[in-house]
Amino acid sequence: MELGLRGKVALVAAASRGLGRAVAEELASEGVSLILCARTENLLEDVCCEIRERKDVSVLGVPTDLSKTEDIERLISEALKHFGQIDILVTNAGGPPAATFENLSRDDWMQATALLLDSVLDLTRLVLPGMKERRWGRILNITSIAAKQSVENLILSNSLRAAVTGFAKTLADEVAAFGVTVNNIMPGYTRTERVEQLALTIAAKEGIEPAEALTRWTAEIPMRRLGEPSEFAALAAFLVSERAGYITGSSVAADGGWLRSLV
């Protein structure tokens, strides 16, 4: 399927590993120029070099702490200076620590809010005017199945992913007439470093092996396996494509059937 993405420019946040990297690679395969950001500079540069060489597209890497507004402002400034415009925004951030409410301080909540919610607001605020002016744009937020069905021990993610969902749904209505779509993509249990770390955390808490935690999650998934980052990335590429121009305000799951709700 021709997605109509060749020649577009996309900013993919937290793209040095996991789902962000998978999305970046998929978009590069479609001929999209990329702005990638992550906190670890050497890892980010390695990823940028690898994508440039394998996909033959232009890639700009900008080290960024997404919890800091000044870093995001610098990121967008450098991106616009280099490419002139941003057609596609894929927001993403590393998941907050697993914990229950009574084990979290106010500072924990503030840090998680800055990373998961404020970063989405800041990125959107800075790229949306250009999209509206060109009357074409795609905003895709990588959230979590936790936005729709709470996950045990993930109260930070459950709460803040839901906040992003409410923001995106409302914004989608506000900008639809300008040819800008706003959607969320909700990964389920996918074979990433994040899921491996959650398994380690649960294993330490319950005195079990990490493999046992992974087996437990797999048993809850109708497909009886974890998702692959490439499967998630294929859906993301479609949602930011020309072909998905009539899809907005939606939260789409890539979860192997884990969610139990009807809609």
Image (cartoon, rainbow, N blue to C red):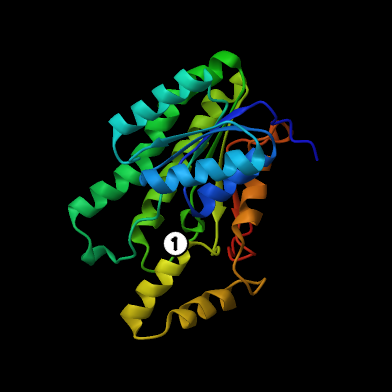
Identify the residue at horizontal 48%, vertical 49% (top origin).
143
Density class for disc 1 (Cα within 10 Å; few <14, some 14-19, many ≥20) is: some
Q: Secondary structure at mark 1?
A: helix
User: At which x and y percent is residue 184?
Assistant: 54, 44
**Which is nearer the eye, 4 or 160?**
4
Q: Is residue 81 above or below residue 9?
A: above
Quarter of the image with the N terminus is top right
Whether residue 190 is visible to the viewer of this picture, yes or no, is: yes
Q: Residue at x 29, y 37 (%)?
A: 68
Count of residue discs: 1
Q: Quadrant of residue 88?
A: top right
Q: Amino acid at mark 1?
A: Arg
Q: Position of residue 50 (x, y in %)?
A: 56, 45
Is 93 left, or right, of 140 in this rendering?
left
Left or right, residue 3 beside residue 228:
right
Q: Is residue 107 above or below residue 5?
A: below
Q: Residue at x 55, y 56 (%)?
A: 187
Mark 1 = which residue? 194
| Residue 113 vertical placement versus 221 (above, below) | above
